[in-house]
């Protein structure tokens, strides 16, 4: 399961010839994201387990399993902002039930991220996915 926005990123990754170009593309995705308001950068929105500072603010529209999930996020590291944008493309607009059904490691694996991120960045990416899944699961209950 994938969104059109994530498929567009995957298609762009296939078009780009090397990891340097893909890395720059991820950075551009991060730069294109609107910054998160300082008032939302609080301990409750901070994602633990990331080497950089990361904040994710979920936005649930509706109630129950069919509620629509999205989030906004930010980081003090530009590449991590790009990874947040990739996760937004993967999850935003899905129902909270669908969020739990996304095989994030497989989808992100299509981009080759696991092969090109440092161990710390990979751990941070997993922490962000875990937070997203946790919030969606609580909203679905």
Image (cartoon, rainbow, N blue to C red):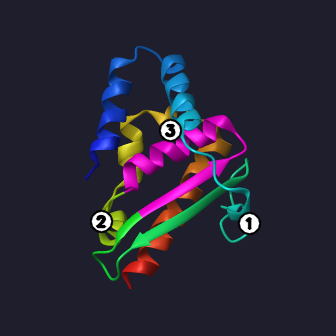
Q: Earlier in the sequence, mark 2 or mark 3?
A: 2
Mark identifier at residue 114: 3
Locate residue 65, reporting x and y percent: 30, 78
Q: Which residue is mark 1?
A: 42
Q: Is residue 73 above or below residue 82?
A: below
Residue at x 50% of width, y 38% of height: 114
Q: Disc 2 on helix, strand or loop?
A: helix
Mark closest to the chain's N terminus, 1 or 2: 1
Identify the main secondary structure in magenta.
helix
In which quarter of the view is residue 141 placed? bottom left
Say above or below: 81 vs 59. Answer: above
Q: Kindly give the residue lying farthest to the top in the view shown.
A: 17
- Residue 59, above or below 127: below
Say if the magenta span includes residue 71.
Answer: yes
Decide: is 117 above or below 23. below
The residues tagged by marks 1 and 2 sit, at their Cα atoms, a distance apart of 27 Å
Disc 2 target residue: 98
Q: Secondary structure at mark 3?
A: helix
Query: Residue 122 vs residue 77: left or right?
Result: left
Q: Closer to the observer: label 1 or label 2?
A: 1
Q: Residue at x 31, y 34 (%)?
A: 8
**Magenta stretch?**
70-92
- Position of 65 with respect to 124 (left or right) is left
- Classed neighbour count for the residue bearing mark 2: other residues with Cα under 10 Å, few (<14), some (14–19), many (≥20): many
């Amino acid at each position: 399961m994938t969104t059109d926005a994530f498929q567009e990123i995957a298609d762009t990754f296939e078009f780009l010839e090397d990891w340097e170009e893909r890395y720059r593309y991820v950075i551009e995705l991060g730069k294109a994201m609107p910054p998160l308001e300082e008032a939302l950068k609080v301990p409750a929105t901070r994602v633990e387990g990331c080497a950089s500072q990361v904040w994710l603010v979920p936005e649930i529209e509706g109630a129950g399993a069919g509620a629509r999930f999205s989030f906004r996020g930010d980081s003090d590291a530009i590449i991590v902002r790009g990874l947040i944008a990739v996760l937004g493309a993967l999850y935003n607009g899905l129902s909270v039930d669908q969020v739990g059904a996304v095989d994030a490691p497989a989808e992100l694996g299509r981009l080759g991220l696991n092969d090109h991120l440092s161990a710390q960045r990979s751990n941070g990416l997993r922490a962000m996915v875990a937070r997203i899944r946790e919030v969606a699961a609580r909203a679905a209950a």
